[in-house]
Image: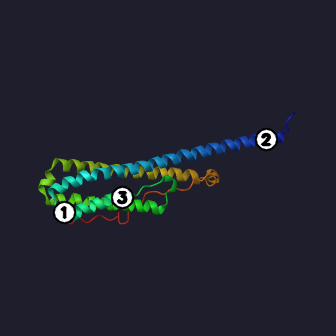
Amino acid sequence: MKLSKSLIAMIAAVVIIGGWAMSAYNGMVGVEEEATTALANVQSAYQRRADLIPNLVETVKGYASHEKETLEGVISARSKATQITLDPTNLTPEKLQEYQKAQGELGSALGKLIAIQENYPDLKANENFRDLQVQLEGTENRINEARNKYNTAVQAYNVKIRRFPNSLLSGIFGFDRMQKFEAEAGAQSAPQVKF
């Protein structure tokens, strides 16, 4: 049985298109996985900060027991922040904003806790407090770096699924745009420090 040239051409076209579709799909899966891994790293960095807070609160409590409102504020903000988790398969702008807001409130509460050291020279001189402060500072840097890496991974993913010809397949296979972390409202203004 001899195949006609048009049948051979159709089979070749199907094989080429199939190969391209498989390659495009695998490429989109790869960049999606990089983005979701980067998101998990952001959450891990935030969790590290949350894990340091009980030790910091206990250290401060021993020196500044009448700063009850500040200590309770940190504990409450930590509780709220750790209750919110992000699911990369169902990440909405609202959920990401809620997460960012809770983390921002925790950061603000921590800032107040760190600031009270000025009123307590013994606390300021405490080695545990200084060590925890250094760890928190390092953790904040890790959080910033993780957020930047996540945003870079999301950008690569979004570009990959939106560029032609991948855009033809991305909707069919359920690859939707992902949301980036954004600066918090008022982040462009320098904070006012009052003692």
Q: Position of residue 96 (x, y in %)?
A: 44, 59
Write the residue at 36% across / 61% down.
Answer: 102
Write the residue at 26% across / 48% down.
Answer: 135
Q: For mark 2, what is the residue?
A: 9
Q: Residue furthest left?
A: 122
**Distance from label 3 to label 1 (Cα)?**
21 Å
Q: Amino acid at mark 3?
A: Ala
Tell me how many marks there are.
Answer: 3
Disc ID at residue 67:
1
Q: In which quadrant is the C terminus drawn? A: bottom left
The correct choice, above or below, for 62 with respect to 34 in the image is below
Mark 2 residue crowding within 10 angstroms, few (<14) / some (14–19) / many (20+) = few
Q: Amino acid at mark 2?
A: Ala
User: Which of the marked residues, 2 or 3, is nearer the chain's N terminus?
Assistant: 2
User: Which of the marked residues, 3 or 1, is nearer the chain's N terminus?
Assistant: 1
The correct choice, above or below, for 50 with respect to 189 in the image is above
**Residue 183 seen from this side:** no
Mark 3 residue crowding within 10 angstroms, few (<14) / some (14–19) / many (20+) = many
Closer to us: 123 or 153: 123
Q: Amino acid at mark 1?
A: Glu
